[in-house]
Image (cartoon, rainbow, N blue to C red):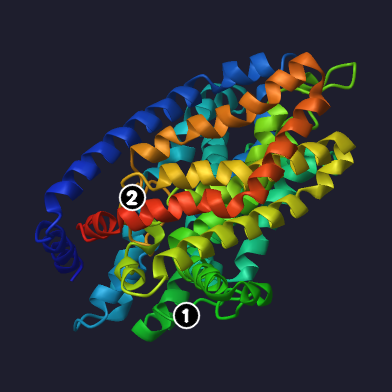
Amino acid sequence: MIFELIRLQFLKSVRSTSFAKSVLVAVFLGFLALLLLSYVLMAGLFLGRIVSELAEGQDPIEVVNSSLIFFFLVEFMYRYFLQTLPVIELESLLHLPIGKRKIIHMLLVRSFISPLSIIAVLLFTPFGFLEVGAQFGTANALFWIGNIVLISWALHWFMLWFKQRYEDSLIGVLIVFAVLLLGGGSTYLGWFNLGELVQPYFAWAQASVIPLLITAGTCILGYYLAYTYYLKNAYLEDLSKEEEAKFVNKNFGFFSRFGLAGEMADLEWKLIIRHKKSRTYLMLSAFFLLYGMIFYNNPQYHSEDGGFSFIFIFVGVFITGIFMIQYGQLFLSWNSGNFDFFINRKDGIAALIKGKYLLLLSVSCLCFLLSIPYVFFGWKFLLIHLATWLFNAGILIHLIIYMALWKPKPMDLNKGAMFNYEGVGAAQFLMIIPMMVAPYVVYLPFSLLINDYAGLAALATLGLLGLLGFNKLSQININRVMKNRYEISSSFRQEL
């Protein structure tokens, strides 16, 4: 039966209308995966030397043991965004006269065959034999390596369960945020060093087989957890049920004040919440609100006279406009599946564009409000965020949308966002130029001739002027869509 399932999957791939395209994509991704894995292997071979250079005078094994928890936190994050679920395959097999248990076992094992599953092996096996083995013996090195690898594999099974159980709910978002904050943020902010707390366990693993047995049991438990959950919920109506995310079927009250454009903004919000790709963009925007933690507390970006680095302007633009930048760059591609509906409605195009403007401005305002706690690092950061937010809302939003309207492409909203380039064209890559250049064209002359705060005032003033002339500026993009609406509609009918 296992070979029969493999044969069915092979026939499904070969008979696909996009088989040639899939093969080319698979070859490219395979080459990319081999290249990245070779880098990981090289890092593993030289890990001991790298650690010795970075932590001079310290035992490399102790340094690695105290840092392993952060590797697993990073693995948790990239597995959350990159690891795929076998739900689609389940839906295509459940109606066949095949035992459900066999299907689930086959799909879980298939999901394990991935480059993600050997990253820990490639990275820590050379270090284990070269460093741990030389000091504690080959057997203890195997215990240590096996412990790390089994933790990585346990994360694989746990993530299969976690994403299917909580990905579409507010609880899942809060858990991911908590892992990020308590894991990396606690050490960065000096609350407590998580690496030092967990280090004794990995030190124990290099001297005893007991931690290896504990981790093996955890890995088996993770597989059982994923297996039992999929077995219990492997019904089409359960796998395709509506998401449980908060506000999924509710309206934002203040949008109703803006008439038809407000209704379009409400519909756009529901589109974001209900679809996987757009929801991922929303979550990434929330994560990037922490971007300032990298720069604002770093002494090398501060001067003794109280000034600040030019990089802070880009950080402010990025934090207060991250959703506008990410979601706005695919401005109409989000509606590629129902664009014809708006063409055939009176004022439908204008209402759609105005609704998108309203939503982007509202979320950008929310990002600014959420960034206010950065005032903890100094009042100047609040002024930076205020000035850059006004510039985003008054000027940059129009530039982003204008470039996004250059030959928009269709995309499938139900696919993941990672390594998915549907809807992405040359405009999305060129968009970074006005985003990075425009704020500095305004800021630098005043900053260099007068001072930094004069530059911020210039950004804020131009942003306010843009807000005062918002209707006329937005009408430029509305007219552009109206002029090219049939060409855009035709491009959206292309096969993905």
Q: CA distance from mark 1 to mark 2?
A: 29 Å
User: Residue at image x 20%, y 67%?
Assistant: 2
User: Where does residue 281 sit, x and y in percent of width and height?
Assistant: 52, 54
Q: Is residue 44 above or below residue 71?
A: above
Quick one: quadrant of the C terminus?
A: bottom left
**Which structural element holds mark 2?**
loop
Q: Amino acid at mark 2?
A: Pro
Residue 10 numbered tag: none
Give the residue pinned by disc 2: 408
Residue at x-position 66% and y-position 62% = 175
Which residue is nearer to you in this view: 475 or 178? 475
Task: Check disc 1: other Cα within 10 Å, few if <14, some if 14-19, many if 20+.
Answer: few
Q: Position of residue 442 (x, y in %)?
A: 66, 27
Q: Is residue 82 left or right of residue 59?
A: left
| Neighbour tally class for label 2: few under 14, some 14-19, many 20 plus, Cα within 10 Å | many
Q: Amino acid at mark 1?
A: Glu
Asked if residue 74 can be seen in this view, the reply is yes
At 63% from the left edge and 69% from the top edge, which residue is drawn?
A: 170
Does residue 292 sit above or below 359 in this rendering? above
In the image: residue 72, left or right of residue 177: left
| In the foreground, 20 or 182 | 20
Q: Secondary structure at mark 1?
A: loop
Quadrant where the N terminus sits is bottom left
Rendered image: mark on residue 242:
1
User: Is residue 327 in view from this perspective?
Assistant: no
